[in-house]
Image (cartoon, rainbow, N blue to C red):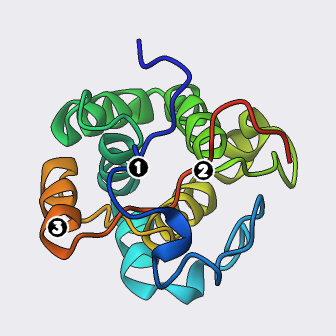
């Protein structure tokens, strides 16, 4: 559906021209799985309504093709039967692929099965740290990047780290 391209397509300035380009660890998560305390808002929001945080992340990771509302309702419905992680772990896999992040501390399946809230928080922090704001829509992020002439960091498809 999306091809092999990264979630963020570079247009204009290169990644190295961005102020945060050299500060981010290449091929590494910018925060740990259990670093929820680093962003209190995301932590509290995810603790109370994980479907909202997940939906915001999913809309960004899927470049707006899945709306925040759709993702949130699916996650909420699956949460009622105790298997929201089934829907959530492929989103983590996609995010990792876009930024060439390692599958750690274990596979995405196990991370979401045993630690869904921590995984969702980490994914939100990763998107924020890499230039996407999950709290606003995909289109709002694109408009912001265009207005500020910012290209979020990307990983060239096919590169192995």
Q: Is residue 157 left or right of residue 158?
A: left
- For the residues bearing labels 1 and 3, Cβ distance under 8 angstroms: no
Vertical order, 17 against 72 (above or below)? below
Nearer the observer, 145 or 119: 145
Alpha carbons under labels 1 and 2: distance apart? 31 Å
Residue under label 1: 10
Q: Please state the horizontal and vertical placement of residue 22, each as a whole percent of the image.
A: 64, 80
Residue 70 lies left or right of residue 41; in this view the side is: left
- Labels 1 and 2: the sequence-earlier one: 1
Q: Residues within 10 Å of mark 1 (few under 14, many from 20)?
A: some
**How dense is the environment of label 3, judged by Cα within 10 Å: few (below 14), some, or many (20 and up)?**
some
Question: In the rendered image, which quarter is residue 30 located in?
Answer: bottom right
Q: How many marks?
A: 3
- Residue 49 location in percent, x, y? 33, 58
Q: Give the number of the disc on residue 73.
A: none
- Which element is circle 3 on? helix
Q: Circle 3 sits on which residue?
A: 144
Residue 32 sits above or below residue 46 on the image: below
Observer-side mark, 3 or 2, equals: 3
Cα separation between marks 3 and 2: 29 Å
Q: Residue at x 54, y 52 (%)?
A: 154
Task: Choose the circle earlier in sequence order: 3 or 2.
Answer: 2
For the N terminus, give its image quadrant: top left
Residue pictured at 19% horizontal, 35% vertical:
67
Rounded to the nearest angstrom, the CA distance separating label 1 from label 3 is: 14 Å
Q: Nearer the viewer, residue 84 or 99?
A: 99
First in residue order: circle 1 vs circle 3:
1
Q: Secondary structure at mark 1?
A: loop
Q: Which residue carries the number 2 mark? A: 116
Residue lying at 68% horizontally and 53% vertically, measured from the top left = 115
């Amino acid at each position: 559906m999306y091809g092999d391209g990264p979630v963020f397509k570079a247009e204009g300035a290169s990644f190295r021209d961005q102020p945060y380009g050299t500060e981010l660890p290449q091929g590494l998560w910018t925060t740990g799985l259990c670093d929820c305390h680093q962003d209190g808002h995301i932590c509290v929001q995810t603790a109370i309504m994980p479907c909202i945080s997940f939906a915001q992340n999913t809309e960004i990771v899927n470049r707006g093709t899945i709306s925040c509302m759709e993702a949130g309702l699916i996650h909420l419905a699956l949460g009622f039967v105790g298997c929201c992680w089934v829907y959530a772990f492929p989103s983590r896999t996609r995010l990792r692929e876009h930024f060439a992040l390692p599958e750690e501390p274990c596979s995405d399946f196990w991370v979401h099965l045993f630690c869904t809230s921590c995984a969702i928080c980490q994914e939100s922090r990763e998107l924020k740290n890499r230039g996407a704001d999950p709290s606003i829509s995909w289109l709002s992020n694109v408009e912001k990047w265009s207005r500020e002439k910012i290209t979020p960091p990307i990983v060239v498809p096919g590169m192995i780290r």
